[in-house]
Image (cartoon, rainbow, N blue to C red):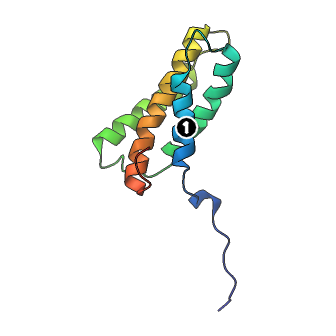
Amino acid sequence: MSDRQEAPNVDDAPIDVELIGDSTETALVMRLGTSTREDINKRTPILVGHLQLLLAEELGADEDETVRLLFHEAYKLLDLKARPAPDATTFAAYMFMREVASLTRRILRVYAQRSGTGVP
C-alpha cells in the first residue's frame, strides 16, 4: 500500500454560495435606465455559468417536485432558442439577465439548504 495521497478532485470542490449570492444580487439591483447593454452582456454569461454549475449538482430533482420544476424552468430558460439574439432590444437582454439571476438564486437556496452551507 502506498503513502501517496490523491489530489482533490476539482469537480468535488464546493460551490461558492457567497459568490453566487453576491453575483445574483448585483444583477437584481441593476436598473434598466442606468445599466448599459455592455454591462448586461458582461453579467449574463457569468449568471448562466452559475446556473449551469448548480444544475450539475444532485439536489434531489427525482424525489422533489419543487426542485424538478426549478430544473425544468432552468433548462427551458437556458435553451439557446429562448435566449435573446445579439440584436434583441436592451430591454429583452435585461429581462433575460434578471430571469437567470432570479432562478439561479432560487436554486442556490435549495443547494445551500441541502449542502448545509446555509441559506444565502
Does residue 94 appear in this view? Answer: yes
- What is the residue that sits farthest to the bottom in this orientation? 1
Q: Residues within 10 Å of mark 1 (few under 14, many from 20)?
A: few
Tell me what residue is drawn at x 67 percent, y 21 percent.
39
The count of marks equals 1
Question: Residue 58: percent from the left, percent from the top?
Answer: 44, 52
Q: Is residue 111 left or right of residue 56?
A: left
Q: Position of residue 8 (x, y in %)?
A: 64, 68
Q: Quadrant of the C terminus?
A: top left
- How far across and down, in percent of the image, does residue 108 sit? 45, 42
Specify the quadrant that holds the N terminus.
Answer: bottom right
Vertical side of 11 occupied by 77: above or below: above
Q: Is residue 64 above or below residue 97?
A: below
- Residue 82, can we see it? no
Where on the picture, by quarter, is residue 53?
A: top right
- Secondary element type, mark 1: helix
Name the amino acid type tagged 1: Asp
Q: Going 64% across and 30% down the picture, which residue do you hit?
A: 45
Residue at (70% x, 18% y) in the render = 38
Q: Which residue is mark 1?
A: 22
* Left or right of 105 on screen, residue 53: right
Q: Residue at x 45, y 29 (%)?
A: 102
